[in-house]
Image: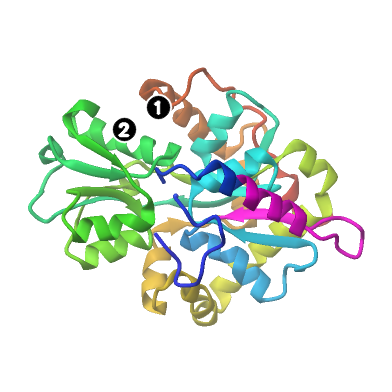
């Protein structure tokens, strides 16, 4: 999946290709050197984002003046693999990812927290196949393009479960999201595990949806995560980011035409297409975020527990993960709470 605007130097793989080591280190160095201090003397809070329609709320917040450019730097990645590595290397302070990546981190390092639930996918992530393939069972022996990420592996596992197939029954092809549409058009793959806006583009080319995130409710969740140390040391900037994000969501709901017009440009979609795409995700407001992240039994806890069970079963985790304490509701509380 690719934006219609030029990408940063990270443009490489959501994906399966490795970034060349020297290039990655060079870009990391440029990011670190480019993080000029704001007037308060602190470097901007660096936020890693991907090509995914709900993440456009961050850019909308910046466009509307809810985020201070001198305090918050939005860094646009084309691939979760690269964004996640940047987060691990400390080149970004906050990153938007699916909860599966949080669990991958948490099995070795419990010092990361969900500070915002961005969206819950309800059809925007999907397996689409050629029209001649009418059922999941017919995927046997077929070539399936999948990005090399926790999300891609998770979706493939759930697809094969539903199809009653084994991994050996299909030909898995690791492929960057931006390459998937071209591979489909050139008949190099029979099916693709992807997400919006690539999903819609492939459907427009005749692809058939055989499985999507609506078939596994609450299992594909996008979250904003940060280290505990970042939450403690960069609280003001983080609060601005979370508040700005939620204000942008409110703006989308009260001024949909203007918001959709602004958001659709980066995704290369028309306003109507963007509206249709966003109908395939649930984007929790402040109150729902507080319910998902806070309380004795945070609403997100059950979903994370289920993710751990499935990921252990699929071999995507090497050890059990205790999900208690992985959420921090403090930034989604109303000021003064």
Side (left or right) of 31 relative to 207: right
The N terminus: image quadrant: bottom left
Residue underneath mark 2 = 157
Side (left or right) of 26 relative to 308: right
> Whole-percent x and y of residue 251?
60, 73
Q: For the point 64% across and 38% down, which residue is it? A: 88
| CA neighbours of label 1 inside 10 A, class few (<14), some (14 to 19), many (20+) | some
> Whole-percent x and y of residue 159?
26, 37
Tag 1's secondary structure? helix
Mark carried by residue 310: 1
Tag 2's secondary structure? helix
208, 24: nearer the viewer: 24
Residue 167 within the segment the image draws in magenta: no
**Mark 2 and mark 1 in contact (Cβ < 8 Å)?**
yes
Residue farthest along the top direction in this orientation: 319
- Where 312 sits versus 25, above or below? above
Q: For the point 74% across and 61% down, which residue is it? A: 72
Of labels 1 and 2, earlier in sequence is: 2
Residue farthest along the front direction in this orientation: 22
Q: Is residue 1 visible?
A: yes
> Whole-percent x and y of residue 62?
67, 70
Residue 44 within the segment the image draws in magenta: yes
Q: What stretch is highlighted in magenta?
A: 25-49
Mark carried by residue 230: none
317, 252: nearer the viewer: 317
- Where 68 sits versus 82, above or below? below
Q: For the point 51% across and 73% down, which residue is it? A: 263
């Amino acid at each position: 999946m690719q934006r219609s605007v030029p990408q940063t130097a990270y443009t490489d793989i959501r994906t399966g290709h490795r970034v060349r080591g020297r290039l990655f280190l060079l870009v990391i160095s440029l990011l670190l050197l480019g993080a000029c201090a704001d007037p308060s003397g602190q470097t901007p809070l660096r936020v890693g984002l991907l090509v995914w329609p709900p993440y456009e709320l961050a850019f909308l917040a910046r466009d509307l003046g809810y985020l201070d450019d001198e305090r918050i730097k939005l860094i646009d990645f084309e691939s979760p693999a690269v964004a996640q590595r940047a987060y691990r290397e400390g080149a970004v302070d906050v990153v938007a990812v699916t909860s599966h990546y949080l669990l991958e981190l948490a099995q070795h390092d419990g010092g990361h927290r969900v500070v915002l639930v961005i969206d819950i996918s309800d059809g925007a992530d999907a397996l689409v196949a050629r029209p001649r393939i009418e059922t999941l069972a017919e995927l046997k022996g077929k070539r399936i393009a999948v990005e090399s990420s926790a999300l891609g592996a998770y979706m493939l596992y759930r697809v094969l479960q539903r199809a009653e197939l084994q991994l050996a029954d299909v030909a898995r092809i690791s492929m960057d999201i931006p390459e998937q549409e071209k591979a489909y058009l050139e008949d190099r793959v029979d099916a693709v595990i992807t997400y919006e806006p690539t999903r819609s583009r492939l459907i427009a080319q005749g692809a058939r949806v055989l499985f999507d995130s609506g078939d596994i409710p609450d299992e594909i969740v996008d979250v904003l995560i940060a280290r505990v140390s970042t939450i403690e040391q960069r609280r003001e900037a983080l609060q601005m980011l979370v508040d700005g994000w939620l204000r942008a969501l409110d703006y989308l709901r009260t001024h949909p035409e203007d918001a959709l017009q602004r958001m659709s440009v980066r995704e290369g979609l028309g306003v109507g297409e963007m509206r249709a795409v966003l109908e395939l995700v649930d984007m929790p407001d402040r109150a729902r975020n507080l319910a998902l992240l806070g309380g004795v039994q945070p609403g997100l806890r059950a979903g994370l527990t289920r993710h751990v069970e499935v990921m252990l079963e699929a071999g995507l985790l090497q050890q059990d993960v205790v999900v208690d304490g992985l959420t921090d509701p403090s930034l989604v509380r109303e000021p003064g709470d």
